[in-house]
Image (cartoon, rainbow, N blue to C red):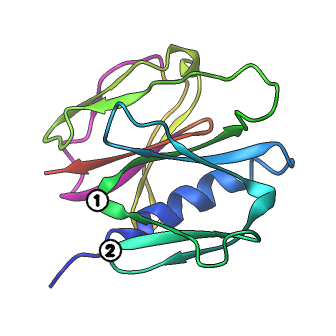
Amino acid sequence: MRKKYYPMIAVALMLSVATVSNADKAIKIHSYDTEAQPVEYLLSDITKIKFASTNFSVETSEDVAGQAFYLKDVSKITFGESSSVEVAERATAAVVTPNPVKNNLVVKGGQELYGSDMNIYSVTGMQVLRVAAWQGETIDVSQLPAGVYVINIQSETIKFVKL
């Protein structure tokens, strides 16, 4: 049976969208290509997000067809202030390593996230692990079954694969 990973993106959207509701808030879709700039949409401009088995598309009032993103190319989705608005950008470069992981997961970068609660969710949306007041310590994920998971710390959402 072929696994479908698109629910993890839906989980990420559901986890974070409630915390951002102003017109200057944006969704940023990051790729594994570290040289590429994230694709950004103002939340107020999004009319629909459609999921398929291998991709998802974001539709706006100006682009009814929507821009497609292949799930295998998306490293994370973040929510925050729009770069197009004159706001000091919170530059969080938090990444997980190793990815995929067997036992111990390290979140590198993102020191401004220290002290926040870290939640790990399965692709079905079930919370499987919580670290209260995370301080950058290594996370033991050895007890988790193999699969795709989403880490949520403040407005950061990062996916990882557990072997």
Q: Is residue 54 above or below residue 127?
A: below
Residue 145: image x %, image y %? 20, 58
* x, y percent for residue 116: 59, 26
For the residue labelled by badge 1, is the local secondary structure a helix, a strand or a loop? helix
- Residue 149 point in image, percent of width and height: 35, 53
Looking at the picture, does residue 134 appear above or below residue 5?
above
123 left or right, relative to 161: right
Residue 121 sits in quarter: bottom left
Q: Which residue is mark 1?
A: 72
Looking at the image, the residue that sits furthest to the front is 62
Is 94 situated left or right of 97 in this image?
A: right
Q: Name the residue rendered at 53%, 30% in the picture.
A: 132
State left or right for residue 161 relative to residue 76.
Answer: left
Q: Residues within 10 Å of mark 2 (few under 14, many from 20)?
A: few
Residue under the image location 19 percent in, 33 percent down: 98
Q: Is residue 156 left or right of residue 8?
A: right
- Between 91 and 19, the one lying in front of the other is 91
Q: Position of residue 160 (x, y in %)?
A: 30, 46
Label 1: how many Cα within 10 Å (few below 14, some 14–19, many 20+): few
Which residues lie in the magenta part? 135-152
Q: Specify which label sits upstream in the sequence, 2 or 1.
A: 2
**Residue sitting at 82 percent across and 51 percent down?**
21
Q: Amino acid at mark 2?
A: Thr
- The residue beneath circle 2 is 54
Q: Nearer the viewer, residue 52 or 34?
A: 34
Say whether marks 2 and 1 touch (CB < 8 Å).
Answer: yes
